Image: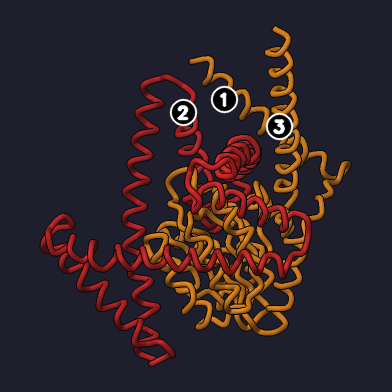
Amino acid sequence: MSAEGLQGLLALGAFLALTIGFAALNSRWPIKLRHISAFEALNKAIERAVEGGERVHLSLGTGSVVGSESAPALAGLAALSRIARATSMSDRPVVVSTGDGAMAILARDTLRTTYDEVNASELYEPTAGRLLGPTPFSYAAGLPSMLRDEQVSVHMLNGSFGYEAGLAADFGERAHNFVIAGSDDVQSQALLYAVAQEPLIGEEVFATPAYLDAGAVHKASLRAQDAIRFIILALIVLGVVIETIT
Amino acid sequence: MRLIRLSAIWAAIALGVGLFVLLGYFVDLEFVTGLRILFMQWAVLLAAAALLVGLVNLAAVHWRKVSLSDEGWLYSGVLILALLVTLILAVFFGPDAPISLFIFNNLQLPLESSLMAIMSVTLLLAGFRVVARRRDLFSLLFLLVTLLVLLGTAPALGGTESGTVASLRELRNWISQVWAAGGARGILLGVALGATATGLRVLMAVDRPYGS
């Protein structure tokens, strides 16, 4: 095994150990999440949508399930489970869209499992998790008619997007939806900062499940991320100091 | 009981495959690397098959709109027609045939390019909206930096040799190479940590995107 391979495995092991450790300590040392106004507004918007008989739309982005761009969509699927529970009391349960066929299947599986768990299997519709278009801009082009037809009031983007993110968020703004949007791509985040009502910056796109109360492990993984981040920062500072001195 | 057993099987498969793929990136053993490549090839094949399932799903949604004559049913009809024509032509003549390339170059490419053009207008409007909606220091800073970078990038009206143009170019380079690059690296660090945490949750079977 190469030195880089060993370092990578050690870093992953440390991440895993910290996550499990923080989750185990959760009852004695409860994790208090920092205030993020976007998630607070999201929770309120979902409540309003349920009360008003309007629909929540979750977009899992245009990234493929094969590759690193699947990560924010996987976080979106964990959030979907929570949103499906919250909207299961509504006449119009959550609808999900994506630009990847496999991700659409995963979204339908998540919806079916969640509705089974809350004894609301009748809410499941195969068209509730759908592919809007197989290319980024064809996906964005399919959004306006879907937002209108499904009477969406909460438009949430939680996945991997390229430049089409700007259009995807803007279509929600034009329909007077509550728009919360995040992506793993830095340039898309800049677009979303300008376009979306509540942009998610940096790793906030991965924190959605934790802020929707998905469980202790989700919160513990946020704490583990912070711990690893501080270790990396300390190592960077140490490296700069050593390099400057020598 | 059956559900619990099934979910355990899915979780075990996801864990096993995930661990082998992950190990393949770190360990130099031929067996592990070969298995990682094999699993990745399977995943690509499955993703392609899933695309077909997705397209059937898409057609079903729009077929329902057409059959119920819902608002915008005509567009749905055009979508189904275009899907069928493209599919038939590509299957019969191949994706590289002149007719398939004609559709791609003369229909899909211009349409998607026009959406890109719409986005530039959208961004301009969004710039005004940011100031109206979020009147804080960060929004003003965002706009100021955008203006400075635009001025430093755009062709100079007064000639490229003037001192002001040179100063603007230097300022743009300083902003993009020092501040923006530094900020982007910080954001990427957070994104990498978030992606790792998400992947580990799937491997721990805490997140089960494959259902139960």
| Three-letter amino acid code of the residue under disc 3 | Ile
Mark 3 lies on a secondary structure that is helix
Residue at mark 2: chain: B
Residue A11, x across and y down, in percent: 63, 26
- Supply the letter of whichever chain is orange: A
Relative to A30, A210 lies left or right: left
Query: Which residue is the site of mark 3?
Result: A228
Residue A49, x across and y down, in percent: 68, 78
Instruction: Work out how far the residue at label 3 is from the one at label 2, CA to CA, in angstroms.
Output: 21 Å
Residue at mark 1: chain: A
Query: Which residue is the site of mark 1?
Result: A8
Instruction: Determine whether label 1 and label 2 are within 8 Å by CB.
Output: yes
Query: Which residue is the site of mark 2?
Result: B25
- Supply the letter of whichever chain is red: B
| Quarter-of-image position of residue B142 | bottom right
Label 3, residues with CA under 10 Å away: few <14, some 14-19, many ≥20: some
Instruction: Work out how far the residue at label 1 is from the one at label 2, CA to CA, in angstroms.
Output: 9 Å
Residue A44, x across and y down, in percent: 76, 71
